[in-house]
């Protein structure tokens, strides 16, 4: 089973505005509640796999969203190249962690935000979200680096600025997704690629139902009863978590974790 990288939330907060979720929440994070929520998620994931914790860094509040560190495939880590200046200082910390763990690190020329926009399904197909953070030209770079075909999906709603906020391939081969986050062409691609789809409403998408962690038959999901019931109906063991403080910044369970 994959291991998980998380980052201590000591310095987490909403201190700038780079997505629609942040706009009304600058300075509004309850630090003690955020730590409590993060700890409950970490402890639950630790029950099923190893979790390593990266120390937080002052003045880097979004370092806690380790999904954006990059992506790890075999012994190689493709380090993110952030599109927003507020996050670019995170790159050296993630690169250092990858290097210390004996991974070969590479970085793309164009903007690329790791597992935030790059997910792999049960069949080994690579899905790349573009439109807000990750440059479409990265698909060609990733094909050269990884020797895989990239399936590019166009995001069209700024509330779902990363692929992992609106699309999650599941371990048994299904997908949970919010169609309204995608262009019509990308919707057609997803519908043709996955036989079993959980298509959620805008309300559920706003509760970050797609931003889940999937490990074997274990699903760790933001509190969302409707999506949880549907996942349980497919045979998954589902645990729900209140991640309200992190949702103020535009992230939830998957954003807080990196598979490696």
Image (spheres, rainbow, N blue to C red):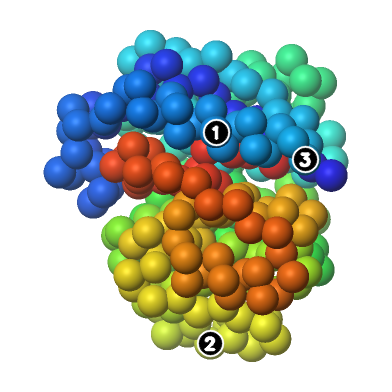
Instruction: Please state the horizontal and vertical placement of residue 152, each as a whole percent of the image.
Output: 56, 68
Q: Earlier in the sequence, mark 3 or mark 1?
A: 1
Q: What label does residue 188 carry, if any? A: 2
Frontmost residue, 205 versus 99: 205
Query: Which residue sits at x=74%, y=70%?
Result: 235
Query: Is the residue under label 1 in contact with that under label 3 (CB below 8 Å)?
Result: no
Q: Residue 70's quadrant in the figure?
A: top right
| Left or right of 233, for residue 60 | left
7 vs 214: above or below: above
| Left or right of 214, for residue 110 | left
Kindly report the distance in space between the C-alpha atoms of the residues bearing marks 2 and 3.
35 Å
The mark lying in front, picked from 2 and 3, is: 3
Extreme left residue here?
24
Instruction: Please state the horizontal and vertical placement of residue 129, each as a whole percent of the image.
Output: 51, 61
CA neighbours of label 1 inside 10 A, class few (<14), some (14 to 19), many (20+) = some
Query: Which residue sits at x=64%, y=31%?
Result: 43
SS of the residue under disc 2? helix
Query: Is the residue under label 3 in contact with that under label 2 (CB below 8 Å)?
Result: no
Q: Residue 37's quadrant in the figure?
A: top left
CA neighbours of label 3 inside 10 A, class few (<14), some (14 to 19), many (20+) = some
| Left or right of 166, for residue 207 | left
Query: Is the residue under label 1 in contact with that under label 2 (CB below 8 Å)?
Result: no
Residue receiving disc 1: 40
Q: Would residue 137 be seen by someone viewing this image from the given angle?
A: no
191 vs 107: above or below: below
Q: Earlier in the sequence, mark 2 or mark 3?
A: 3
Query: Which residue sits at x=70%, y=59%?
Result: 237
Residue receiving disc 3: 48
Q: Quadrant of the C terminus?
A: top right
Kindly report the distance in space between the C-alpha atoms of the residues bearing marks 2 and 1.
37 Å
Kindly report the distance in space between the C-alpha atoms of the residues bearing marks 3 and 1.
13 Å
């Amino acid at each position: 089973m994959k291991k998980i990288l998380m980052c201590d939330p000591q310095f987490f907060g909403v201190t700038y505005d780079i997505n629609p979720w942040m706009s009304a929440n600058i300075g509004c994070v309850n630090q003690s509640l955020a730590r409590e929520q993060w700890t409950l998620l970490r402890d639950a994931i630790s029950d099923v796999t190893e979790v390593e914790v990266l120390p937080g860094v002052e003045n880097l509040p979004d370092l806690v969203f380790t999904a954006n560190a990059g992506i790890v495939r075999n012994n190689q880590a493709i380090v993110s190249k952030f599109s927003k200046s507020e996050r670019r200082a995170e790159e050296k910390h993630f690169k250092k962690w990858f290097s210390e763990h004996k991974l070969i690190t590479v970085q793309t020329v164009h903007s690329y935000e790791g597992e935030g926009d790059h997910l792999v399904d049960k069949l080994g197909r690579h899905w790349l979200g573009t439109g807000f953070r990750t440059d479409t030209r990265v698909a060609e770079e990733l094909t050269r680096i990884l020797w895989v075909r990239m399936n590019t999906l166009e995001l069209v709603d700024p509330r779902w600025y990363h692929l992992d906020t609106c699309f999650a391939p599941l371990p048994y081969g299904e997908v949970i997704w919010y169609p309204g986050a995608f262009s019509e062409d990308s919707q057609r691609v997803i519908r043709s690629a996955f036989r079993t789809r959980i298509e959620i409403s805008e309300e559920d998408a706003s509760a970050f139902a797609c931003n889940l962690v999937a490990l074997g038959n274990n699903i760790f999901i933001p509190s969302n009863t409707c999506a949880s019931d549907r996942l349980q109906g497919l045979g998954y063991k589902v645990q729900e978590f209140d991640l309200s403080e992190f949702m103020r910044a535009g992230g939830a369970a998957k954003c807080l974790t990196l598979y490696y």
